[in-house]
Amino acid sequence: ALCVVALAVVIYSSETRTAEAKTCNPTKLLPCMSALTSSSPPSTSCCSRLKEQQPCLCGYIKNPALKQYVDNPNAKGVASTCGVPYPKC
């Protein structure tokens, strides 16, 4: 739980730096947190949000505060399960 709170703080504080478009908002990916940090399968809500945020993923990968969550084997598995192509930035 502490990790999720810490991530939320990091995401909120870095939101303006990662926003490539007005629709980019890394906090929308919070439903994916358990799938990104463990072997839990992504929820329907997670997949929906991931599809919405797909254009923003390269910006999130380039952000040092978010990279560890978006650029890891679990994230690639979540993207694959959700039918979202993992970005090549």
Image: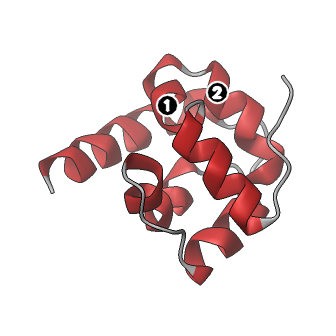
Dot 2, how many residues are within 10 Å of its Cα: few (below 14), some (14-19), or many (20+)?
some
| Residue situated in front as seen by the camera: 81 or 16 | 81
The kind of residue tagged 2 is Ile
Q: Name the residue under label 2.
A: 61
Residue 33 visible within the image: yes
Label 2 residue SS: helix
On-image quarter of the C terminus: top right
| Residue situated in front as seen by the camera: 87 or 80 | 80
Q: Name the residue under label 1.
A: 66
Outermost residue toward the left?
2
Q: In this view, does 62 lie above or below 21?
A: above
- Marks 1 and 2 close (CB-CB < 8 Å): yes
| Residue located at (75% from left, 50% from top) | 22
Residue 79 is situated, as x and y percent measured from the top left of the image, at 71, 54
| Residue situated in front as seen by the camera: 65 or 37 | 37
Q: Which of marks 1 and 2 is nearer the N terminus?
A: 2
Residue 33: numbered disc: none
Q: In this view, does 44 lie above or below 37?
A: below
Dot 1, how many residues are within 10 Å of its Cα: few (below 14), some (14-19), or many (20+)?
some
| Residue located at (69% from left, 49% from top) | 24
